[in-house]
Amino acid sequence: MSQADLASQHCTPRKGKEHALDGVQIETLLARLPGWRVAAEGKAIVKDFKFADFHHTLGFINAVGFMANQEDHHPDLEAGYGHCQVLWSTHDVGGLSLNDFICAARVEALLAR
Ligand SMILES: C[C@H](O)[C@H](O)[C@H]1CNC2=NC(N)=NC(=O)C2=N1
């Protein structure tokens, strides 16, 4: 599945351990997402984004927030003047689900031009 295929999917409610991805699935999906890495002992994926200034950073945060509300899947965001770290994890699963990778690909799509 390409990054575009991933980004074209929508999140669905995923609750329970049966939706947790295994290590092979995580590595396969991560290979489609340059710059993303596993964090929190395999329970999350993160990427650090850089921007020219605060306005661009805030624009990114708003775009990510809008998409996250549409998908009903919500990231942890840490930001400063010219940077934002995006972390995806599925709380209802206690780790990584396909929703996290769909949303990571959708973040990439927001920045594509
Ligand atoms: C009912 C609703 O779909 C759930 O509460 C969603 C909301 N957003 C969520 N976001 C994240 N990151 N993980 C979740 O498990 C989650 N669950």
Image (tube, rainbow, N blue to C red):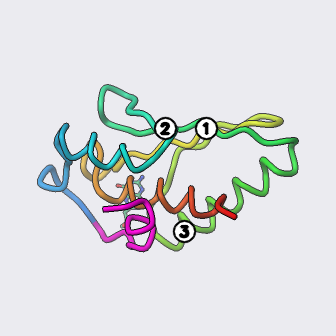
Mark 1 highlights which residue? 85
- Quadrant of ligand 1: it is bottom left
Question: Which stretch is magenta?
Answer: 1-13
Q: Is residue 56 located in the magenta-colored stretch of the structure? A: no
- Residue 16 percent coordinates (x, y): 17, 54
- Residue 111 percent coordinates (x, y): 66, 58
Quadrant assignment for the C terminus? bottom right
Type of the residue with mark 2:
Val
- Tell me the residue at 78%/42% (across/down): 51
- Along the horizontal axis of the image, is 98 left or right of 68? left
* Relative depth, front residue between 13 and 86: 86
Q: Is residue 12 located in the magenta-colored stretch of the structure? A: yes
> Would you say the magenta stretch is mainly helix, strand or loop?
loop
Q: Which residue appears farthest toward the left when viewing the image? A: 18
- Tell me the residue at 57%/63% (across/down): 109
Mark 3 highlights which residue? 69
Determine the image quadrant of residue 95.
top left
For marks 2 and 1, the one nearer the N-term is 2
- Residue 50 percent coordinates (x, y): 72, 38
In the rendered image, the vertical position of residue 22 relative to residue 12, given as above or below: above
Q: Distance between the Cα atoms at labels 3 and 1?
A: 18 Å
| Dot 1: element | strand
For marks 3 and 1, the one nearer the N-term is 3
